[in-house]
Image: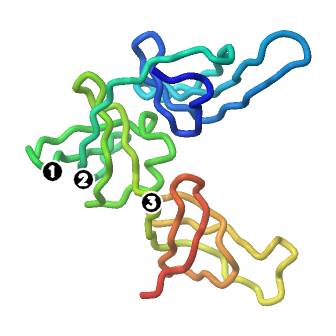
Amino acid sequence: MYSTSDFRRGLKIEIEGVPYSIIEFQHVKPGKGGAFVRTKLKNLITGRVVDRTFRAGERVEKPILEEKVMQYLYCEGNHYYFMDLESYEQTFLTGDQLGESKNYLQENINITALFHQGKLIGVEVPMFVELTVVKTDPGVRGDTASGGSKPATLETGAVIQVPLFINEGDKVKIDTRTGEYIERVSS
C-alpha cells in the first residue's frame, strides 16, 4: 500500500479496483483543520482525468500491473497496433487510451506495455526519442524577440518548439515526459 506521503508524478495507484496514474499532486496544510493532498489522476483504462482529494496519511492500494516489452507496428485510423515480442500476438489501443504517448510512436519502436488483469491498458514510451522535423519555418537571423524558438512539426504529427537553427529534415532528440526539444542529432 502507498501513503499520501509516497505520492509523486507517474506513480500508479489503485482506487476501488481501477488503476490510476498520478499526473499532478499538491500537499496542502491549511491553518485550520488537517492537511490534505489534491491530485489529478488519469484513469489508465479509459484515459479520463479526474480530480481527487486525499486526507494526509490516507492509504491507497498498489495496482497489480504486468509490464511487457512490445513493439509498435502501425496506426490504422484511431487504432495503434502493438506486437508481443515473445508470442507475436497483436493487440491495439485507441488514440484516447494512448494520450500524449502517441506523439512519440515510430514504427518498430520498442515500448513498455502495461496490462491490468490480462488486458492492455497503456504504454510507456522511452524517455527520449529521436524524430525528424518534417515542417518548420526558416529561422530569421537576429529574430530572437520570440525567445529564439519556433514551432516544428515532427514525423509523428506532434508540434514542438525548437531553436531557430533547426531546419526541415533535421533529426531532433525529444524528452517524452515534457515534450520538449533536447538537442539536434547529427546524421
Residue at mark 1 to residue at mark 3: CA–CA distance: 23 Å
Indicate left or right for 35 with 64 as reference: right
161 is higher (above) or lower (below) than 120? below
First-in-chain label (1 vs 2): 2
Label 3 secondary element = loop
Label 2 secondary element = strand
Q: Residue furthest left?
A: 87
Which amino acid is tagged 2? Gln
Disc 2: which residue: 71
Label 1 secondary element = loop
Q: Quadrant of residue 56?
A: top right
For the N terminus, the image quarter is top left
Front-most of 42 and 99? 42
Which amino acid is tagged 3? Thr
First-in-chain label (2 vs 3): 2
Residue at mark 1 to residue at mark 2: CA–CA distance: 7 Å
Q: Residue at x 52, y 39 (%)?
A: 10
Disc 3: which residue: 156
Disc 1: which residue: 85
Question: Alpha-carbon neighbours of circle 2 within 10 Å: few (<14), some, or many (≥20)?
Answer: many
Question: Alpha-carbon neighbours of circle 3 within 10 Å: few (<14), some, or many (≥20)?
Answer: some
72 is higher (above) or lower (below) than 150? above
Q: Are marks 1 and 2 in contact (CB under 8 Å)?
A: yes
Residue 131 point in image, percent of width and height: 45, 69
Viewer-nearest of discs 1 and 3: 1
Which amino acid is tagged 1? Leu
Question: Residue 171: which disc?
Answer: none
Residue at mark 2 to residue at mark 3: CA–CA distance: 16 Å
Q: Are marks 1 and 3 in contact (CB under 8 Å)?
A: no
Q: Residue at x 79, y 25 (%)?
A: 28
